[in-house]
């Protein structure tokens, strides 16, 4: 009976793995009731590693190449099984292959905005996304920490865990760096390098090596982006009072050339000055520290000289210039003096 059982056994002379699909990280060679012949050939292709596991214990690991399996090439397994140096019988062992190819274009991103403390805006919620690539470098650690005895373990199986690690590490980096959102968005290459350096030990723990890490975009949710756009517009506008003075002074020479002369725009000029002064006061109050957002707007200050009076005076002076009584320089000096009384 024992002889018949021995005859029924199938013996393996060649062990190898051809990767039939992308994204496979670990593959368990189908042993079933097979036994491995002493002196069998193990083929490990480029971008692969192989590992023998004896009753749950990691034994020998093989790099790419053609290997003859015997007590000399299997020292750890020989020790675990207590073989002598002349052992030449078939044996049983689990064999795992691992792909060490680069796993490219792995995407990461914040599924929901994350809240960070920002030195410019206080507390803000931000989004970020990008890509990264990695490869398996330590089969024993990956087997113990991740894949275990599964027949097949792929990139998609570990993808969710790695994305979670990226988001957690990124949030931690924000808290430690104190870098504002504006600086992060403007220096994405440096931001990517800092995140990669912080993530490398995390990947190493699982037997993986992080090859590249890229931050493609850093942004705020739509409602916060509108607030940021408003603030940028206010900063670009600058001093509203000077802006109004410039606009008023520029309009007078153009008005003198229009039909109706200076008198034709008197009402418009007066209204424009009033609106400009009101806007300038409102902007100044809004940008002062501690100002109440709901405080009623102060009434615009009444100018010492009305806009209509200035327009009438300038019109008369302009006529004197046309008659040669006043020079252009004298007119310009008087115009500046009158406009100064309006601002």
Image (tube, rainbow, N blue to C red):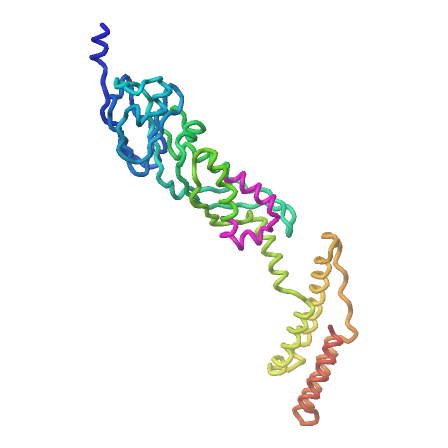
Q: Quadrant of residue 318?
A: bottom right
Q: Relative to residue 295, is residue 199 depicted above or below?
A: above
Hey, which residue is sitting farthest right in the picture?
A: 304
Q: Residue at x 77, y 62 (%)?
A: 299
Q: Position of residue 174 (x, y in %)?
A: 58, 45
Q: Relative to residue 284, is residue 191 depicted above or below?
A: above
Q: Position of residue 84 (x, y in %)?
A: 32, 18
Is residue 186 found inside the magenta-colored segment of the image? Answer: yes
Hey, which residue is sitting farthest top in the picture?
A: 1
**Magenta-highlighted stretch: main secondary structure?**
helix
For the C terminus, give its image quadrant.
bottom right
Q: Relative to residue 149, is residue 162 depicted above or below?
A: below
Q: Nearer the viewer, residue 14 or 253?
A: 14
Hey, which residue is sitting farthest front in the picture?
A: 85
Q: Position of residue 182 (x, y in %)?
A: 58, 53
Magenta range: 166-192
Q: Quadrant of residue 297?
A: bottom right
Hey, which residue is sitting farthest bottom in the picture?
A: 324
For the N terminus, give its image quadrant.
top left
Q: Position of residue 94 (x, y in %)?
A: 33, 22
Q: Nearer the viewer, residue 293 or 131?
A: 131
Q: Residue at x 30, y 26 (%)?
A: 72
Q: Residue at x 60, y 50 (%)?
A: 179
Q: Is residue 85 left or right of residue 121?
A: left
Q: How many marks?
A: 0
Is residue 208 found inside the magenta-colored segment of the image? Answer: no
């Amino acid at each position: 009976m024992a002889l018949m059982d021995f005859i029924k056994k199938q013996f393996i002379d060649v062990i190898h793995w051809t990767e039939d699909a992308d994204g496979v990280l670990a593959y368990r060679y189908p042993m079933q009731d097979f036994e491995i012949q002493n002196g069998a050939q193990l083929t490990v292709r480029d971008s692969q590693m192989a590992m023998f596991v004896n009753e749950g214990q990691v034994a020998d690991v093989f790099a790419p190449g053609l290997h003859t399996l015997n007590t000399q090439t299997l020292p750890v397994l020989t020790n675990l099984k207590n073989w002598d140096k002349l052992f030449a019988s078939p044996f049983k062992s689990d064999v795992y292959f691992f792909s060490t190819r680069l796993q490219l274009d792995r995407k990461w991103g914040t599924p929901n905005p994350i809240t960070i403390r920002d030195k410019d805006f206080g507390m803000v919620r931000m989004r970020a996304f990008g890509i990264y690539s990695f490869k398996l470098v330590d089969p024993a650690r990956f087997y113990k920490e991740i894949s275990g005895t599964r027949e097949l373990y792929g990139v998609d199986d570990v993808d969710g865990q790695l994305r979670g690690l990226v988001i957690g590490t990124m949030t931690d980096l924000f808290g430690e760096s104190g870098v504002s959102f504006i600086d992060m968005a403007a220096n994405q290459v440096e931001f990517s390098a800092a995140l990669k350096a912080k993530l490398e030990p995390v990947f190493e723990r699982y037997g993986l090596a992080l090859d590249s890490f890229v931050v493609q975009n850093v942004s705020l949710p739509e409602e916060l982006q509108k607030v940021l756009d408003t603030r940028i517009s206010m900063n670009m506008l600058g001093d509203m009072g000077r802006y109004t003075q410039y606009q008023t002074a520029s309009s007078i020479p153009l008005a003198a050339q229009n039909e109706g002369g200076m008198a034709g725009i008197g009402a418009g000029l007066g209204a424009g000055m009033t609106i400009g002064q009101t806007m300038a006061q409102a902007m100044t109050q809004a940008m002062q520290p501690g100002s109440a957002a709901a405080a009623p707007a102060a009434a615009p200050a009444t100018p010492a000289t009305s806009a209509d009076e200035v327009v009438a005076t300038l019109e008369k002076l302009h006529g004197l210039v046309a008659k040669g009584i006043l020079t252009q320089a004298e007119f310009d000096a008087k115009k500046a003096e009158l406009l100064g009384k309006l601002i």
